[in-house]
Image (cartoon, helix red, strand yellow):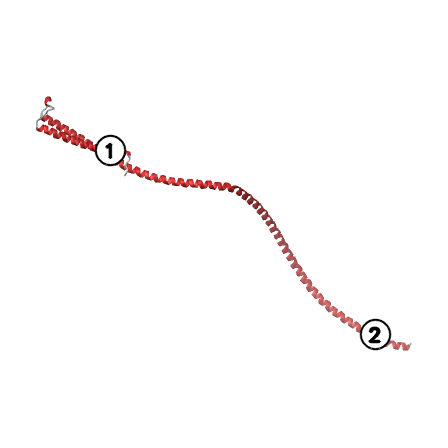
Amino acid sequence: MASTPAARRALGIAALAVVALFVVDLVLLARITRDERRVASHGNPQGAGQGKTPTNAADTLRTAHETLQAEHEALRTQADELAARVKQLEDEADALRTTVATRFGDHEVLRSQATQGATAVAELEAANDRLATLEPKLTAAAELVAKLNADLKAAKERAAKLDADLKTARAKRTAAEEHAASLQKSLDESTQTLEAATGVIEQQTGEIAALKSAIKQLKQQLGADESEATPGEESGS
């Protein structure tokens, strides 16, 4: 697991603190051993001219030992605090690493979206270029549509006029059909009358022919009567 520079510095400080504690322990152990040997032999070479007794030297050593122990405990406490700080820094580093990874993922998503956006922009520019190329054709098409609309309007007007004319013609046809039906009725009536008249004429023609025949016969009879009367008149004269 990679560490941040701050975590590495904290680890170095903690290691130095541990080493310092180890050295202090060694020094303290050496001093106590040496002083115990001096007290045991009742020797005080360094403090002979100062009037110190072995008991005072032992007290001094004990005080120094306690002081060193206190310093040792303080250093150990600092080492523990440094270790806790190192653990905290490592946790923060992990959280930061997670955040960086997440943001890197978001960055990759944004980069992908940016690439897609650039592609979309390029496609839009190409579409604009095609639109600019098609604009004259669109203008011509719009003019053609306007002309076709005008023609369509004129055709609708002509269709409306033709429809009105057709309605008028239908009305006239209906009136003509009604008039023709009336004429047909009159014709039928006239035909019936003519047929009746024809029958009467035929009847009268037969009667006339019979009359003519009767007149002819009457004339013939009259002629015969006159012929018979003429010789008598001649003989009387």
C-alpha span from label 2 to label 1? 187 Å
Is there any visible trace of residue 51 in the rendered image? no
Task: Give the numbered dot on residue 190.
Answer: none
| Vertical placement of residue 201 versus 79, above or below | below
- Residue name at image x 18 percent, y 31 percent: 23
Q: Amino acid at mark 2?
A: Gly
Would you say 226 lies left or right of 75 here?
right
Task: Give how far across and how far down residue 191 sits, in percent.
Answer: 69, 63
Residue 234 appears anywhere in the view: yes
Is 220 situated above or below 122? below
Residue position marked by numbered label 2 in the rendering: 223
Helix, strand or loop at label 1? It is helix
Report the side of 29 relative to 147 (left or right). left
Report whether 114 appears left or right of 155: left
Q: Tell me whether circle 2 and circle 1 mark residues in contact (CB < 8 Å).
A: no
Instruction: Find residue 12 and name its label.
Output: 1
- 196, 153: nearer the viewer: 153
90 or 70: which is nearer to us?
90
Residue at the extreme right:
237
Amino acid type, callout 1: Gly
Which-is-in-front pick, marks 2 and 1? 1
> Horizontal and vertical percent for residue 25?
16, 32
In terms of image quadrants, where is residue 36?
top left
Q: Which residue shows up at 24% across the image and 33% down it?
A: 12
